[in-house]
Image (spheres, rainbow, N blue to C red):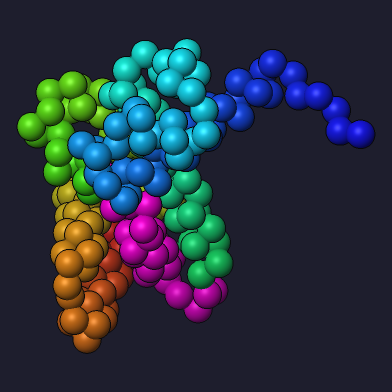
Amino acid sequence: MTARRTQKERRDATRAALLEATITSLVEVGYTGTTTTEIVRRAGVSQGALFKHFPTKAALVAAATERLFAGLFVDFERAFERASRDEAPIVAAVRGLWRVFCTRPLLAVYRLYAEAPSDPELRRVLRPVVARHEAHLARFARELFPAIAASPEHRALFEGIVFAMQGLSLQRAVHVPQRTERELLRGIERLAARLAAGAGA
């Protein structure tokens, strides 16, 4: 016999199902196509259950984005930990970050970024989520590379590298020749290595 789940366990399971359904829907059909009807269908719950947990669609999407960012961060940590000991730490970080940028769930984030400028409510709920995520990344980067973080110039260059990778991954979703991608990534790795060396990292 299986033990009956507690009310909290049922509530947590429903919330998790709604968040996962939202993320999957965002990846596949974007924010506009992610209706509450579509979400509850994917999650296998009722509309009433959805609104017990989240008062609006925007609130649900914000919570799903927070969950998505947390999962992507864990993916990066794992990729960084699995890196070869022969790799320079900064190169391992770049490669781990690129693996995350190539994951399918990140398409959901790009779709939200594309639609937020024309949707004030979406933009409003996303801003604090993105700010917390960026602050989390910044703290982790400071722990990994304190010498780079100590210099405003080096920190700005490192952030520029990350944004360049983000732009490449966005273009990659449409088309980037494999040879071009490899050459660009090798160039980014060399630039990151020179940055670390210049900062004494």
Left or right: residue 72 versus residue 166 is: right
**Residue at the image position 48 percent from the left and 23 percent from the top:** 46
Q: Camera-side residue: 65 or 193? A: 65
Instruction: Specify the principal SS of the magenta part.
Output: helix
Q: Camera-side residue: 62 or 164? A: 62
Quadrant for the N terminus in the image: top right
Residue 155: x and y in percent read 23, 49
Residue 188: x and y in percent read 23, 71
**Residue 12 picture quarter:** top right
Magenta stretch in the rendered image: 84-109
In the rendered picture of this protein, how many numbered marks are placed on residues? Answer: 0
Left or right: residue 130 versus residue 55 is: left
Using the rendered image of the protein, determine whether residue 153 is visible from the camera's viewpoint.
Answer: yes
Quadrant for the C terminus in the image: bottom left
**Residue 101 picture quarter:** bottom left
In the image, residue 167 above or below residue 151: below
Instruction: Determine the residue located farthest toward the bottom in the rendered image.
Output: 179
Q: Camera-side residue: 15 or 96? A: 15
Using the rendered image of the protein, determine whether residue 143 is visible from the camera's viewpoint.
Answer: no
**Residue 100 picture quarter:** bottom left
In the image, residue 107 above or below residue 47: below
**Residue at the image position 29 percent from the left and 72 percent from the top:** 189
Left or right: residue 38 versus residue 6 is: left
In the image, residue 77 above or below residue 178: above
**Residue at the image position 27 percent from the left and 47 percent from the top:** 29
Q: Camera-side residue: 49 or 84? A: 49
Residue 90: x and y in percent read 37, 64
In the image, residue 177 above or below residue 121: below
**Residue at the image position 34 percent from the left and 63 percent from the top:** 102
Q: Is residue 181 magenta?
A: no
